[in-house]
Amino acid sequence: MVLAELLELAPGGVEEEEGPGWIEYAIYGAPGELPDLGSLEALAGSEPIEVSSQEVPDDWADRWRDFHEPILVADRVLVRPSWEQVEAPPAIDVCIDPGQAFGTGAHPTTRMCIELLVELADVGAAQGSLVDLGTGSGVLGIVGAKLGFSPVLGVDHERAALEAAAANAAANEVELNPVRANLRLEPPPDAGSVVANLTAPLLRDVAARLGRAPRNLVCSGLLVREADDVAAAFAAAGMGERDRRLQGDWAALRLSPQ
């Protein structure tokens, strides 16, 4: 729940790490973009817990290297950093260096989106165009391109994300067309299929501005308790829920026209 709330405040993304008796949230952003946290108090149930905040040196563009490790999804998609070499990679090998963008493939929401994209490909649905909304590092768009979707568009409001997505697509020898758009204000591009790993409020904005209904829509970035509300928002736009995945506190949905 804390991570989901912080994602709303953090323009450059959030990193969560934990150890015995503590959890750390690193909120990334340029000077002047970050909220002033000030003095903090919190409750875990009815028990008060100690909260401290500290501004750290401006090395946030490099800290992802500390926790970016190879991860295998759906037994066939390996998402790895460039410095991790694999002698016998699985069917789909995706090399991602996010830099100042968001997304290494490790988060449960990203993994569930990849699983659902793989299943769409298995039933022959990886045809036509794919739009990756909130592309970040481009990981989902790149996976989609390697599964056979074409053309692939990566939509993001952050220029650093679009640059990272384009660089990662080139490194993976696939085409991903970067598109800068503010999804809070603009409708998403029309496409045969859409993948959207966004927060629940932003997914509701997308649903409200959805134009031509895609054949398939995969969305995540929402907590389990938010899934019904997001599904209802897309139902109002003519998209019916076909599958729901849960992993820990997070949920993913697959929808198609009703």
Image (cartoon, rainbow, N blue to C red):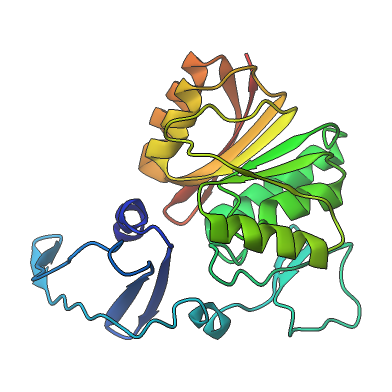
Q: Nearer the viewer, residue 52 or 117?
A: 52
Q: Quadrant of the N terminus?
A: bottom left
Task: Classify residue 180 by image quadrant.
Answer: top right
Q: Nearer the viewer, residue 17 or 178?
A: 178
Residue drawn where x is 89% and y is 62% of the image: 91
Q: What x and y, as percent, mark residue 175? A: 83, 51
| Left or right: residue 108 compared with residue 145 | left
Q: Is residue 193 visible?
A: yes
Q: Is residue 73 visible?
A: no
| Left or right: residue 134 compared with residue 13 | right
From this view, report whether residue 60 is shown above or below residue 161: below
Q: What x and y, as percent, mark residue 33? A: 31, 61
| Left or right: residue 181 compared with residue 257 | left
From this view, report whether residue 136 is shown above or below residue 70: above
From this view, report whether residue 50 is shown above or below residue 36: below
| Left or right: residue 18 compared with residue 71 | left
Task: Classify residue 202 by image quadrant.
Answer: top left
Task: Classify residue 149 by image quadrant.
Answer: top right
Residue drawn where x is 43% and y is 62% of the image: 13
From this view, report whether residue 245 is shown above or below residue 93: above
Q: Quadrant of the C terminus?
A: top right
Residue drawn where x is 56% and y is 39% of the image: 219
Q: What x and y, as percent, mark residue 257? A: 65, 17
Q: Nearer the viewer, residue 167 or 95?
A: 167
Q: What x and y, as percent, mark residue 69? A: 64, 79
